[in-house]
Amino acid sequence: MNRVKVSLRPMVSRINLPTVLKTTFLPGDSIESLIIATQVGEIFYIRNGVIGTFLDIRHRILKLGGSSGGYDERGLIGLAFHPGFNYNGLFYLHYSLAGTQGPVAFSESFKPNPCDPQTLNLKWVDREVKYDHIDTVEEWILQSNGKRRVYRSGSSFYRAC
């Protein structure tokens, strides 16, 4: 058996709440970039050891943490590049919309505890009329001049419970 020596070194620091890590070639470019998306709505690129902002949609993302300021599964939660991204500049974002913070979908007693089996079968209350927020999936385009703009064709909105 061959032994391989592996070492790690930090590439970037001070990026808050990363949710997506991908590599891609920007349109018209021959250098691969590492793309890091954060839950709060910032998307960074790293190329040749330099970090820059790819897109900042923090103003489109709902305020995270709710009234308790704690753990949150909302925000910018998905990023995908079209297979022809290098040529057409199309990419897709899945995020929780700002201004859609609705009433909580759980009853006050909904507090599942994985260590207490009796709490794991609790039910949602009035799921059809109460919701936590609204998510969107949008198609964006990176134009050849490097500017980003939303390309809303085919956007879909749905309730996320």
Image (cartoon, rainbow, N blue to C red):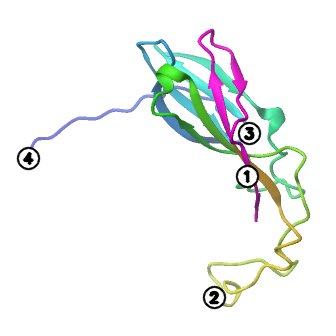
Q: Separation of disc 2 and disc 3 at Cα?
A: 33 Å
Q: x, y percentage for residue 49? A: 48, 16
Could you say whether the residue bearing mark 1 is in a helix, strand or loop?
Answer: loop
Q: Find disc 4 in the rendering and name its residue.
A: 1
Classify residue 125 as left or right of residue 93: right
Could you say which quadrant of the image residue 12 lies in?
Answer: top right
Pick out the residue farthest to the front. 153
SS class, disc 4 = loop
Location of residue 68 by image quarter:
bottom right
Amino acid type for the residue under numbered disc 2 = Pro
Q: Which residue is mark 2?
A: 117
Q: Nearer the viewer, residue 36 or 140?
A: 140
Residue under label 1: 74
Whichever of labels 3 and 4 marks the residue nearer the N terminus, that label is: 4
Question: Which is more foreground, mark 2 or mark 4?
Answer: 2
Label 1, residues with CA under 10 Å away: few <14, some 14-19, many ≥20: many
Q: Disc 2 versus disc 4: distance between alpha carbons?
A: 46 Å
Q: Which residue carries the number 3 mark?
A: 40
Residue at the far bottom in the pictured view:
118
Task: Please provide the residue range marked out in magenta.
Answer: 138-161
Q: Where residue 100 sits: x, y (%)?
A: 88, 51
For marks 1 and 3, the one nearer the N-term is 3
The secondary structure type at the circle numbered 3 is loop
Residue 134 x %, y % = 80, 54
Residue placed at 62% from the left, 81% from the top? 115
Q: Nearer the viewer, residue 101 or 66?
A: 101
